Amino acid sequence: MLALSSANPTQAPVTRFSAETCCLSINQFHLAYAGKTALRDLTLDVPRHRVTAFIGPSGCGKSTLLRAINRLHDLNESVTHHGQIQLEGQDIHASQMNVTELRRRVGMVFQTPNPFPMSIYENVAFGLRLQGRMPKRKRDDIIEWALTSAALWDEVKDRLHRSAWQLSGGQQQRLVIARTLAVQPDVLLLDEPASALDPISTLKIEELIRNLKSQLTLVLVTHNMQQAARVSDYTAFLQQGELVEYGPTDQVFTNPRLQRTENYITGRMT
Ligand SMILES: Nc1ncnc2c1ncn2[C@@H]1O[C@H](COP(=O)(O)OP(=O)(O)OP(=O)(O)O)[C@@H](O)[C@H]1O
Ligand SMILES: [Mg+2]
């Protein structure tokens, strides 16, 4: 159950889920690039087996937050952060956290499809091969399952050993999703996954996102308000690195608590 509590409606609500439903828990998380704040004391929970959309103007910190969730900032020496991000109750910055395992559990898909220069089959097998040896039969089964889950199997089953680069942009993005799914993540972070795609491919990705939530937890960054309204269960609105409003998508879109949210979702502020 979502519990919104705020004494002052002009302040961001503290948004919590119970331990049974919470997948990611972000607590007063603050991040700066070379001392310049990009995320300001963010506190929110992401529920398991739901689609949570992060929306907000360009530069508000959406991608920074997604990158923080699977520790992609680790290699950037200018980044400093404090506060906590927990995945299924485990602090992702704890010394015992294995970063490779964290990135298996938290998959990430970017705006531009980035298949590797290899066959369709090898793209999906890539993460599996890193996990060690496995009988070919088992690997083939996982690859079929991942491509089916990514709604691509029927389109590629007769050309698995052809180059992934021969696929259309929309197919490439679904292939990247299949590659991520093959290692069975708990969470899929999608950073504007359809913004480079045509409308039909976009609808396929949206349908895929809706179908995947029975298997895992999804976080979707999008600039497309209709898309957020169509596919997400919860929506978080960020502005200048702060959480402005968070709640069930229906409520945020039809009855936002704050004028700032309404201005953004109705296009009066970009
Ligand atoms: N590698 C970086 N080094 C320095 N500053 C950065 C870096 N990446 C992002 N920033 C800054 O952090 C802030 C948040 O950027 P971020 O990319 O997270 O925004 P965003 O919400 O994803 O925007 P968009 O919708 O345009 O993708 C911006 O002010 C940006 O300039
Ligand atoms: Mg971004």
Image (tube, rainbow, N blue to C red):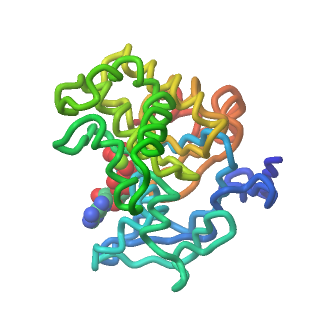
- Comparing 228 with 202, the one in front is 202
Residue 205 visible to an observer of this rendering: yes
Q: Position of residue 215 (x, y in %)?
A: 63, 40
Q: Is residue 224 left or right of residue 197?
A: right
Q: Residue at x 65, y 52 (%)?
A: 46
Q: Is residue 8 left or right of residue 91?
A: right
- Comparing 257 with 183, the one in front is 183
Q: Is residue 244 left or right of residue 7?
A: left
Q: Position of residue 108 (x, y in %)?
A: 41, 50
Q: Position of residue 77 (x, y in %)?
A: 28, 79
- Comparing 119 with 191, the one in front is 119
Residue 57 visible to an observer of this rendering: no
Q: Residue at x 53, y 77 (%)?
A: 97
Q: In the picture, residue 111 is in which quadrant? A: top left
Establish if 118 lies above or below 135.
above
Q: In the picture, residue 112 is in which quadrant? A: top left
Q: Position of residue 121 (x, y in %)?
A: 30, 37
Establish if 21 lies above or below 52.
below
Looking at the rendering, in which quadrant would you find the C terminus? top left
Q: Is residue 8 left or right of residue 149?
A: right
Q: Residue at x 35, y 56 (%)?
A: 129
